[in-house]
Each structure stands twice: as structure tokens, then as C-alpha cells.
């Protein structure tokens, strides 16, 4: 598999900041990472974090989502099909069921169609309903190729390059969540995922 072949060559570093050290790979949580960083997290989950909890990944209901679901399952993860555009309500119910069964949930809050680096409300609502923390996962890949035709400039690491996976402080969302509070937490998650990321392009 292309992904495994490339990932095996990478120089990898995993950093857990603050309370994230007690959660990453050890406790149930909702992991959030940007859509264009989905090349490596399945590999990181299986071979680096080696967590005690089962990971489930939300993928879109598109053909690309089906491919990502296959990759996730190859790495021992589970997959939920759905998005804000297709199967949204059913996908949300499926994610809650995965969490009730003790899985962690991995979500790309700006996917599947963007806008890039802007959190959608689904991950915030899921954290509010479930009571589980969101663990922002930043994947820094200085040596990479970008697929310019993709809406998110999808990132593919160059063989033998270095990647740094940083789990930032967990974000806890209150159970009582009105529209204004939801927007505030969406902005907070955007900031946590962007913090310290020199490869993120500023908005024009």
C-alpha cells in the first residue's frame, strides 16, 4: 500500500501537551484534525500511539470517503459514513452509537468540502451531547507535496521527511449549547488546530 510505504520512511515525533498526555491513546475522546492531514493519522494510530481504545473515523458518503474508510479499516479502525452534506443526521447518530460502544471518534471538522481550516458545528455538537473532550491533533509536515486541484490542498509527505504530531490541550464543550456558544467553541477549535502551525496559509 502506498500510504504504508511512505509512512514507514518518515521520521515521526508525537507530542502530547498538558492534559492531552493522559488522554491520547489512553482514554475515550473525539479527535479533530484538518481534512488535508488525513494521509498519516491511520498509520500514527496503529504504529505510534498504539492506543488501548478503538478508533472510529467519520468519512464522507462520497467515493473518496469510501476509499478513506477502506484505508481506516485496513489499519484496524472503524468507519462511519456521513457528512453535513450527505447522510448528516444518520451519520451523527452513527457517531453517537460508536461513542456509546466505547470507541474514540476521529473527525475532520472542515471536511468534506470546506471551507478550509474552518470548523463545522458537528464536532462541537457531538462533544456537547457525548460529554467527551475534543482532542485537537495537529500534524506538521514541512516536507510535503500539495494537491493544488483539491479544495484543501491535500498534503502528502515526501518520503524520508519529518512529521510532528501534536495533541493539544483538550477542549471540553458544555452540555447546554446555544447557537452563540456553539460558534465560540468552533472558533476556539479553529485556534487550537492552527496554533503553532507555520505551514498554514494566512487567510487572504
Image (cartoon, rainbow, N blue to C red):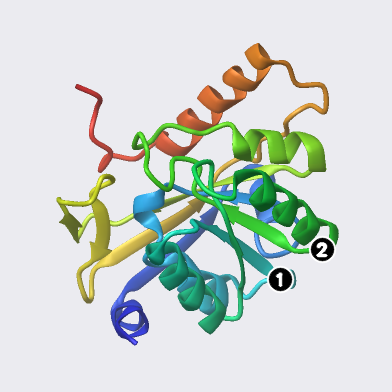
Q: Position of residue 117 (x, y in %)?
A: 38, 36
Mark 2 or 1 closer to N-term? 1
Which residue is at a point 62% across and 40% down the rendered structure image? 123
Q: Residue at x 53, y 41 (%)?
A: 84
- Tell me residue 124's x, y (percent): 65, 34
Q: Quadrant of the C terminus?
A: top left
Q: Are marks 2 and 1 in contact (CB under 8 Å)?
A: yes
Closest to the observer: 18 or 146? 146
**Mark-to-mark CA distance, 2 and 1:** 7 Å
Q: Tell me the quarter of the picture where residue 53 sits.
A: bottom right
Q: Secondary structure at mark 2?
A: loop
Q: Up-down: is 125 above or below 188? A: below
Residue 18 in picture, x, y percent from top left: 64, 43
Comparing 44 with 153, the one in front is: 153
Asked whether residue 136 appears in the rendered view, the answer is yes
Residue density around tag 2, few if under 14, some if 14–19, many if 20 or more, within 10 Å? some
Q: Which residue is mark 2?
A: 102
Badge number at residue 69: none
Q: Residue at the location (48% across, 52% down)? A: 166
Q: Is residue 27 visible?
A: no
Is 202 on the left or on the right of 22, as rendered?
left
Q: Is residue 71 above or below residue 31?
A: below
**Residue drawn 84% across and 57% down?**
100
Q: Secondary structure at mark 1?
A: loop
Classify the position of the N terminus by image quarter. Answer: bottom left
Q: Which mark is residue 54?
A: 1
How many numbered tags mark residues here?
2
Near-viewer residue (176 or 92): 92
Left or right: where 204 falls relative to 11: left
Amino acid at each position: 500500500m502506498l500510504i504504508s510505504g511512505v509512512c514507514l520512511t518518515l521520521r515521526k515525533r508525537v507530542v502530547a501537551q498538558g492534559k492531552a498526555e493522559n488522554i491520547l491513546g489512553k482514554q475515550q475522546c473525539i479527535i479533530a484534525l484538518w481534512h488535508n492531514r488525513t494521509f498519516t493519522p491511520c498509520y500514527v494510530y496503529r504504529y505510534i500511539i498504539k492506543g488501548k481504545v478503538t478508533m472510529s473515523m467519520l468519512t464522507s458518503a462520497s467515493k473518496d470517503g469510501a476509499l478513506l474508510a477502506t484505508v481506516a479499516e485496513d489499519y484496524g479502525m472503524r468507519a462511519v459514513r456521513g457528512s453535513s452534506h450527505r447522510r448528516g443526521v444518520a451519520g451523527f447518530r452513527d457517531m453517537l452509537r460508536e461513542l456509546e460502544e466505547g470507541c474514540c471518534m476521529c473527525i475532520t471538522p472542515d471536511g468534506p468540502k470546506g471551507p478550509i481550516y474552518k470548523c463545522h458545528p458537528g464536532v462541537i455538537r457531538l462533544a456537547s451531547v457525548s460529554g467527551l473532550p475534543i482532542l485537537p491533533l495537529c500534524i506538521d509536515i514541512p516536507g510535503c507535496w500539495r494537491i493544488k486541484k483539491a479544495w484543501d490542498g491535500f498534503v502528502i509527505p515526501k518520503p524520508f521527511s519529518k512529521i510532528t504530531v501534536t495533541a493539544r490541550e483538550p477542549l471540553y464543550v458544555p452540555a447546554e449549547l446555544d447557537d452563540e456558544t456553539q460558534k465560540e467553541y468552533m472558533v476556539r477549535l479553529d485556534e487550537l488546530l492552527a496554533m503553532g502551525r507555520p505551514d498554514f496559509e494566512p487567510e487572504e
